[in-house]
Amino acid sequence: MTPPRARLALAAEVALVAAMLLGAGALRFRHLDRFIASDELRWTCRSINFHTALADRRWADTFQVGHPGVVTMWLGTAALPLDTVGAWRDLARDTEGCTDLDTLDNEGNEAVFRSVAPLLFQARRGVAAATTVLLAALYLVLRAGAGLGAVPAVAGLALVAFDPFLLAHSRVIHLDAVTSLLALLAVVALAAASPRIPPLPPAPATLPPDAAPGDWRTRWLALSGVLAGLAMLNKASALVLGPAVVLWLAWTGRLDAGWRPALRRVVVWTLAAAVVYAALWPAMWVAPLQTVAGVLGKAQAEGGEPHASGNFFLGRPVEDPGPLFYPVAGAFRLTPFGSLAVAAALGLAGVAWRARRGQRKAGRGGRPARTGDRGSPSPRAERARPAAAAMPGSAGLARLDALPAHPGVTHLVAVLIAWAALFTLFMTIGPKKFDRYLLPALAPLQLAGGIAVAVLADRWRLAGRAAGLSVGRLAGLVLVAGQAWAAARTGPYPLMYYNPLLGGARTAQRAILVGWGEGYDLAADYLNRLPDADGLEVAVRGVSNFAPLFHGRTRSAEGYRPGRTDYVVLYINQVQRRQDADRLADYYDHPDLTPLHVGTIAGVEVVRILPNASAAPGSPLRLALGQQLTPGTVLVAGGETVLARHYAGAGPLVRYWGHWSADDAAAALADALPADWRRGIVVRYLAHDPDAVLTAIDRIARRDAPFVVGTGDGAIELTVFNRSSP
C-alpha cells in the first residue's frame, strides 16, 4: 500500500501540475482577437487550401509550401470547418495561399479583407490547444521516461510553459511554437531511451542496455522518432534532428553495446520518423520524390539568402547579422528566471563533466566507466572534501560533490544543452536570421535550466530542515511563480517581452529587430474610431497585418498616393531597417510633421500614424494656398484628393472628378461656381489628376502660368484663373 505521506505528495504534485497547465492554457487562449502577426494570413489560407485538398481528395495539393507546415495546417484544418470559411475557400486558392494580395488591394475589397480576421483568430485556437497538450505530454515524458523527480520536472515545465517568447508563438497560427515543442519532446524521449538513464521501477533494473525491440527503451526510442518526424513535418529546420540523432545513436550505441545494437536503434528511430512523415502528409502518398525535393529546395532557398526585407542588429540595418546575433537575441528573449536557470544548467553540466572526467582518470588505464557505473569520486574530490567541510558555511559545497541524486539527470541536461547548441550553430550558418528561429534552442535550454536549479538547490538544505522543505522544492516553487508572473504581465503582447536584466524592450529596439505585427492593431483601433473611418485610405507596409483590422481602405507602402492617401502608418521594424526610404524621409524624418497618434507597447513606440504630408500644415501646398487663397478666391480641387476631403478653409470649394471630360467639367463648374466669383485656383496632383479641368477653365476664365510645388509623385500644380467676363 502507498503510505499516506506519499499519497499526499502525489496529490499535491497532480494539483500543482494541473494548475500550471490550466494557467498556461488560459494564457494561450486569452486575447486571441488582437493583432495579426506576419505570415499568419498566409498560414490561414494555406490551412484552408490544405483542408479543401483533403475534402476533394486531391492529395498532391496538400503540398502548399516547402516549409512545409503540415502539422500547423492540420491544426488549422481542425479549427476551421470548410462550411465556415465562406468566400475564402476560393480566395485562398486564387491568391495562392494569400501570397498574392494584389487583387485584394483593389478598391471595394475592404470587406473581403475584414472577413478573414475572424477565421484567422479561430485558426489560432488549434495552435493554442496543441501547444498546451504538448506541454502536458512533456511533463509525462519527463516523469515516466526521463525519470525526473517531481521538483525538477515541475521547475523545468514552468520555465517552458510560461516562457513569454514561447507563449507568444503558441498564440499565433504559425510554425515555431509547435515545431519547438515537438523537437523538445523528441529529444527528451531520446534521452529516456538512452541506456545511460537507469530504468525506474517497475522496470527491472537488470534489463540489458539494448534489449529486445519490445522493451521500454525501444518504445521511447520509437516515440522519439515519431515526435521528430512531426517536427520535421512542420518546419524544415527540424530536419537537422535526423543526421544529429542518427550520428548520436550510432556513436553512443557503439560505446555502450557495440555496432549491431547501435544499428538497430538507428533503424527504429529513423523508421518511426519516416513513417509518420509519410503517413500524415498525403502529398507523400502520390508524389514522394517531388514533395521531398520541394521541401529541400525551399530550405536551401530560404536559408541560403538573407531576408528580402533585410534585418537590423546593434543599431544599424544589415542583411546578415552575423554569428553574434543568436547569442544576443537569445539573451533578450529570456526572463530573469530563465537567465538564472540557463546559467545553472551550464554550471551543472560543467560540474558533471569534471566529475565524469575524474572518474575516467580513476578508472583502469584511463578507460571510461561503463554505462550505469556511477563510479567513485575522483581522488582530487576526495581530498577536497575534508577541507571544504572545514570551511565556514561549506557543508553545502561538500554535498555538491555528490551530484546528481539520479544519474540520468546530468545526462538529460547535457543532451538538452547539446541539442540547443547544435541547433543554434546550424541556424547561425545561414544569412537569414530572426529571433523566432532560435525558439527550438531556447526551449530545451530553459527546460535544462529548470531541472538544474531544482537539483542544485536541493543540495543545500534549509538549516535543520525544521519545516521539512528542501531548498530544491522552494526553488521550484519560486521558478513556477516567477515565470508565471512574467508571462501573465505581458497581456496581449508577449512578443514585446524582453529581458529586463538587459533593459527590456527599450534596449532591445536598439539591438535587434523588434515587432512582428503587434501594434498595427493599435493603429487600426484608433483610425476606426474616427468619424469617417470607412472612407479613409491608409498606406502601411504590413498590409496583411493591418487591412483585416481596419474599416477603411488599405494600400501597401508602395501603393501610397500623395493626392489620395489620408494617413501613413509607420512601423517600428520598418524604421529600424529603413524600408521605404522615401516614405521615411517624408514622414518619419519630417521635423515639422506632428503624428496623429503614437502607439506604444512596453514603453516602446511601435506604430506611428501621420497625416498626408502633402496637405499637412506647413507643407509647401498649404503655404502656397495660404498666399493665394485671398478672401473670395475659389478653390478647385479633385474630389478624390486628400486636400478636398479634409478641406476646412473659409473660402468656397468646388470639386472636380478624374473621370470627367472637358465638357463634363465645364458644365459642372458653371453650376458649382458662385455667381459672384472673380478669382480661383486649380490644384492638380500631377501623378493622378487629368488636365480636362484646365480645358474647361479656359472656356470661362483666363489662366495664369502654373507653378509647381513638391517633386516626383508628390508634385502638385497650382493654376490661378480669373473671370474673363462680368
Image (spheres, rainbow, N blue to C red):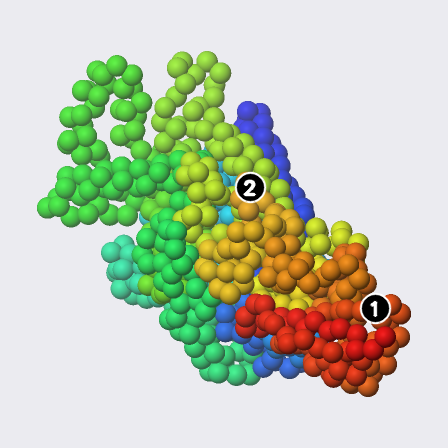
Q: Kindly check if marks 1 and 2 are in contact, taking CB atoms under 8 A apart as contact.
A: no
* SS class, disc 1: loop
Q: Quadrant of the C terminus?
A: bottom right
Q: Is residue 111 left or right of residue 18?
A: right
Circle 2 crowding by C-alpha within 10 Å: few under 14, some 14–19, many from 20 = some
Q: What residue lies at 73% left-to-right and 60% top-to-bottom? A: 630
Q: Is residue 720 above or below residue 662?
A: above
Residue 93 picture quarter? bottom right
Q: Give how far across and how far down residue 83 sits, in percent.
A: 78, 69
Q: What residue lies at 55% left-to-right and 24% top-to-bottom? A: 5
Q: What residue lies at 38% left-to-right and 64% top-to-bottom? A: 319
* Residue 339 in sight: yes
The amino acid at mark 1 is Trp
Residue 679 picture quarter? bottom right
- Pointer 1: what residue? 677
Q: Give how far across and how far down residue 347 sits, in percent.
A: 31, 37
Residue 709 picture quarter? bottom right
Q: Is residue 222 left or right of residue 524?
A: left
* SS class, disc 2: loop
Disc assigned to residue 377: none
Q: Give how far across and how far down residue 89 sits, in percent.
A: 72, 74
Q: What residue lies at 59% left-to-right and 71% top-to-bottom? A: 708
Q: Is residue 628 above or below residue 59?
A: above
